Image (tube, rainbow, N blue to C red):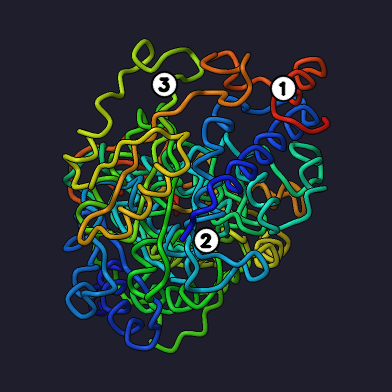
Amino acid sequence: MLTDFKQLEETARAIRANVIRQLYRAGSGHPGGSLSAADILTVLYFGEMRVDPKNPQLPDRDRFVLSKGHAAPVLYAALAEKGYFPKEELEGLRKLGALLQGHPNIKVPGVEMSTGSLGQGFSAAVGMALAARMDGGGRVYALLGDGELEEGLVWEAAMSAGHYRLDNLCVTVDWNGLQIDGRNEDVMTVAPIGDKFASFGFHVISIDGHSLPAIAGAFAEARAQKGKPTVVVAKTVKGKGVSFMENEAGWHGKAPNEEEAKRAMAELGGAL
Amino acid sequence: MADKTATRQAYGEFLIEKGKTTKNLIVMDADLSKSTMTAGFAKAFPDRFFNMGIAEQNLYGVAAGLAVSGKVVCASTFAMFATGRAFEIIRNSIGYTHANVKICATHAGITVGEDGASHQTFEDVALMRTIPGMTVLNPSDAPSAKRLLDLAIDADGPFYIRLGRAAVPVLYGADAALAVGKGQLLREGRDFAVIATGVMVHEALRAAETLAGEGIGVRVIDMHTIKPLDGEIVEKAATETRGLVTAEEHSVLGGLFGAVAEYAAAHCPVRILPVGQRDSYGESGKPDELLRKYGMSADAIADAVRRLAG
C-alpha cells in the first residue's frame, strides 16, 4: 500500500497547480471547492483505487464519482496527472468544442458519471455499487460537498445505501464549511454530518481532509467494513493551498485573474 | 368484446418472460410494485429487483448508476411521480448520459380514476419528449405493449414507456409486427384521419365506426411511438385526407398534438384538431366517466371530425 507520502504531496501540489492553470485560462469555474478536495482525490487516484488509465473501462475497476461536480477542475487535473488524457486538454476547460466541459461528462476518459446537478452523483454511485456487488466488481467512491448535503436526494441515496448494506461504497464529504452564499450554518445548517450518516446506517470516520496519511487510513478502514457503507467526513479548508483563497466563500465560483493566478502559482510552485 | 387487459398487466407478465433470457435486466420500483406489476419479477428474480422505497428521485438516480455499469434497467412508478418529481434526475443522469434505462411508468392520464387530480398526469409525454435522445412510447393494448417493451429493452438508450391502470380491449395479435418509430394503420379512410395514442386508440376506432354510419370515412392510426414521430405516416394522412384529429389521454399542450402539429407545420400544413385534456386538472371518478367528462371519448373524437367536415 502507499507509504510514499512525500511523493503524494508532490502529486497534490501538481494537481492544485493545474486547477489554477485551468481556471485562469477558462476565465470561470470553481477554485475553492476544487482546492479543498485536491488531497482527497490525490489519495484516491494515486494510492487507493485500482484503476488503469490505459483501460478506463475495465469491468472490475474501482469507480469514483465526483458528486460535487462543480469541482471538475480537480477531477480533470487528477485524471490528466494519472494519464487518462494528455495534459494539453486541461487548457480547453469550458471552451467551445473542448473535451472538458464545465461540469464532468461521462464521455471524458476516466469520468464515470456526468454530474453537476447536486445529489445525483451519490445516487448513481449507489447504483454502481449495487451493480459491482452483483458482478464481483470493484469498490465505488463518491465525493460530496457539504452544501450538497442540503439536497433531499442525498438522503434518499444515503437511506438506500444503508438499506442495501453497501460495504463496497465509500462516500467522502468535503466539509470546508462554506457554500456560495456563505457559511453552512448561516445558509442552512448541515451539522452534525457524521451523526446524520450514522443514523442512516453508515460507518463514520472523521478526519483532517488535508492529512494524506489520515485520508489513506480512512479509505483502508472503509475497505475493512462489512455490511455497511462508509462515510469519511473530511474537515477541509476551502481554497486550500492558495493563501488568499483559503476560507473565503467568494472564491467558490470565481476564476483568478492574471495577477491572482500568478500569485497563486508563486505559492504552489511552477509557471502559470 | 375481446378480453380486457391493462398495459401494466402486460408489462408485469412480460418482465418475467424477458428476465429469463436477458440476464442483465434489472427491475426497480418505488413501493408500488403491486400496482405497477413489477412484483412478479421481484418474486421470480429477487436478486435482480430493487425496491427503492418512496423515493422517485433516487429510483432514477440509482437506475442511472446501474445502467452505466452495464445493466439494462426497467424502473417503474406512477407516471406522475416518475416524470414530474424525478424530471431533472431523468434529464441529467439518464438523458444526458444516454443511459440504458427504461422508464416504465404506469397509471398515466385520467384513467387512473378514483385517486383524482394529484395522481392524474397529463404532462408526462410533454416532459419526456423534450429530453434529447429519449424515445417515447404509449402502447394501446397488452400485445403491443409486450412487443414494444421487448424492442425497448433490446435497444440501447433511454425510453419512456407510458402504461395505463385501466383494462383495455385487445387490438393486436401476439405476433403483431410493430416497430418503434412507425405508426400503425388500423383502419383505412380517405376523408379524415385520426392519429391516436394509448387508450384513445380504442376511442378512435369507435368514433370511426360511428362516422362510417354517417358516410364519413376515417383513417385511424395508432401512434404508439410519439418520439421519434413517424413523419411519413403523418404526411400521408395530411395529403390523402382533408384534415387530422389527434387523440391522446394527455394535455393538448406538448404531447401527441404538439408532436404532430410541429411536424405538419414544417412539412405538410393541414388543419389539425386536438382531442385531449384541455388545460385543466382532473378529478375523482370512474375512468369511463372521466374520459367522457373531460372530452377524451369516441364522442369527442367524432365531434372533432364533424367540425373538420364543416
The crowd level at tag 1 (other Cα within 10 Å; few <14, some 14-19, many 20+) is many
Residue B176 placement (x, y as % from top left): 46, 85
Question: Label 1 amino acid?
Answer: Ala
Residue visible at 61% across and 17% down? A243
Residue B194 placement (x, y as % from top left): 53, 59
Per the image, label 2 sits on a secondary structure element best described as: loop
Measure how far apart labels 3 and 2 are at the Cα level: 34 Å
Which residue is labeled 3 in the image?
A177
Question: Label 2 amino acid?
Answer: Ala
Closer to the camera: disc 2 or disc 1? 1
Which residue is labeled 2 in the image?
B99
- The residue nearer to you, when weighing B217 against B158, is B158
Mark 3 vs mark 1: same chain? yes
Q: Is residue B223 visible?
A: yes
Per the image, label 1 sits on a secondary structure element best described as: helix
Residue visible at 24% across and 66% down? B167
Measure how far apart labels 3 and 1 are at the Cα level: 22 Å
- The residue nearer to you, when weighing B264 against B71, is B71
Q: Are marks 3 and 2 in contact (CB under 8 Å)?
A: no
Closer to the camera: disc 3 or disc 1? 1
Closer to the camera: disc 3 or disc 2? 3
- The residue nearer to you, when weighing A150 against B33, is A150
Residue A239 placement (x, y as % from top left): 57, 23
Question: Label 3 amino acid?
Answer: Gly
Measure how far apart labels 2 and 1 are at the Cα level: 40 Å
Q: Are marks 2 and 1 in contact (CB under 8 Å)?
A: no
| Quadrant of res A111 | bottom right
Residue B168 placement (x, y as % from top left): 28, 67
The disc numbered 3 marks a residue on which chain? A
Which residue is labeled 1 in the image?
A264
Per the image, label 3 sits on a secondary structure element best described as: loop
